[in-house]
Amino acid sequence: MTGRQSPPTERVLAVLSLLGEEPRRRLTLTEVSMRLGLSKPTCLGILAALTEAGFATRDDVKAYGLGPALLRLGWAAETGLASLDIVRPHIRRLHEQLGLPCVLAGLHDDSLVVLDRVGRIPVGDHRDIVGERFPCTPPLGLTNTAWRDDDAVRAWLARTPLVPFAVSQERTWALVRAARERGYLVERRTGDDAATPTIVLANLEVSGLPRSVLDVLRRHMPPVEWAEYTTELPEDDDEMVPLAALSAPIRDRLGRQRYTLTLLADRAQAPAGVCRSWASALTAATEAATTALGG
């Protein structure tokens, strides 16, 4: 910490933090005083001010808990840019740990929005991509939808696909269930080119071509089968995997999928053992970011 410290402010923060440690349990003045090592008069003054401001509540047996004013602050932080500021350090640490590009995306008004990027995206593509929007319509959006609730997945699947879609409901739900169980989703290269069918379609959507031209091109694309998606990695650590990307969810305080963090592979193939270590690092980063958001 830098700058001058404020002991009175630190005591107020200590009281709030203590009440937040066990939000379903209420504490008496004596318990707050003993656990923080502060005098009762000091704690009483802090608790009285917090209660008056709505940041704490006091019941009939003179026990204290968190107050409703904190809900407004929490909602403001969760819906504002503050949540991105909380998540970004975890993305940077993951990039520094693995040296791989990381992309953060979220949903806004039924669109997929690229919110942040750390590291260079694949060679040959010089777009910044941050701020780009894509329709969250099958086959786009699987990684941004898999960890939402079942109703959200059904609503997404009910949308008219952008291109010919040859994926059964059973295949989709199998991927969703496996992704939820594993905590991540694997996207493999389907040929010599790093661009998977969904990447090709996403790039087409932001190409700037007239809508009439896009409609024709999409109709002539081969049916999408999601052959690139899986949650399985070979058991043999030395077996080479044509990995394109790994994706995992970052959740908010209500357990909802708030963001999707995607780790991009920097080579045509990688050993399965390395891919597993990348997946472990990715899920550790998303879990840390989830905790930081109060999830």
Image (cartoon, rainbow, N blue to C red):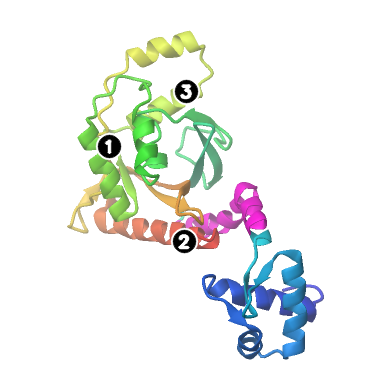
Q: Residue furthest front?
A: 60
Write down the residue under mark 1: 228
Q: Amino acid at mark 2?
A: Gln
Q: Name the disc covering residue 242, or none.
A: none
Determine the residue positioned at 32% across, 13% down.
220
Q: Name the disc covering residue 205, or none.
A: 3
Write down the residue under mark 2: 97
Q: Is 5 in the magenta?
A: no
Q: Provide the secondary structure element on which disc 1 rests.
A: loop
Instruction: Measuring from the top left, give residue 24's x and y in whole percent.
Output: 51, 71
In the rendered image, the quadrant that contains the N terminus is bottom right
How far apart are labels 3 and 2 at the CA level? Answer: 32 Å
Is 121 placed above or below 60 here?
above
N-terminal of the pair, mark 3 or mark 2, is 2
| Other residues around mark 1 within 10 Å, as few (<14) / some (14–19) / many (≥20) | some
Determine the residue positioned at 53% across, 38% down.
114
